[in-house]
Image (tube, helix red, strand yellow):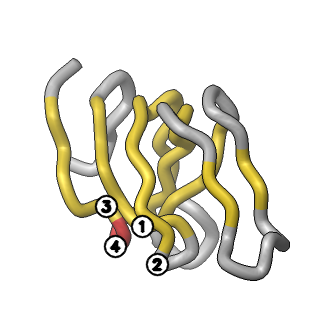
Amino acid sequence: MWNLESMRVKGNYMGDIPVAGVVTYSHVAYGGDVQHHIKIDAGFSACDGRIIRHAGEVIIVSNKHITEVQDQ
């Protein structure tokens, strides 16, 4: 199943920043990769402070970086 809309997921943003939240939208991107828009539960920043996201913001995570899926 590739459509994870309304499901709670855990994964890695940009391949290495752990995130968790609810998928608001799933789609097939150009080239066939599946991507998920995730409304995150908690904010985060990278070690160098360049990337900052707050709780409730939506980020895009590739399907290959989703590590856990739960029903809502």
Give yes or no for contact between labels 3 and 2 (Cβ–Cβ under 8 Å).
Answer: no
Q: Residue at x 50, y 69 (%)?
A: 17
Q: Is residue 10 above or below residue 21?
A: below
What's the amino acid at mark 4? Lys
Residue 20 in the figure: left or right of residue 9: right
Asked which quadrant contains residue 72, the reply is: top left
What's the amino acid at mark 1? Asn
Crowding at mark 3 (Cα within 10 Å: few <14, some 14-19, many 20+) = some
Give yes or no for contact between labels 4 and 3 (Cβ–Cβ under 8 Å).
Answer: yes
Closer to the camera, 67 or 43?
Answer: 43
Q: Which mark is residue 12?
A: 1
Asked which quadrant contains residue 60, the reply is: bottom right
Give yes or no for contact between labels 1 and 2 (Cβ–Cβ under 8 Å).
Answer: yes
Q: How far apart are the alpha carbons under marks 1 and 4?
A: 9 Å
Q: Secondary structure at mark 2?
A: loop
Percent of width and height locating residue 14: 57, 74
What's the amino acid at mark 2? Asp
Q: How far apart are the alpha carbons under marks 1 and 2?
A: 5 Å
What residue sits right under mark 4 in the picture? 64
Can you tell which of label 3 and label 2 is closer to the viewer?
2
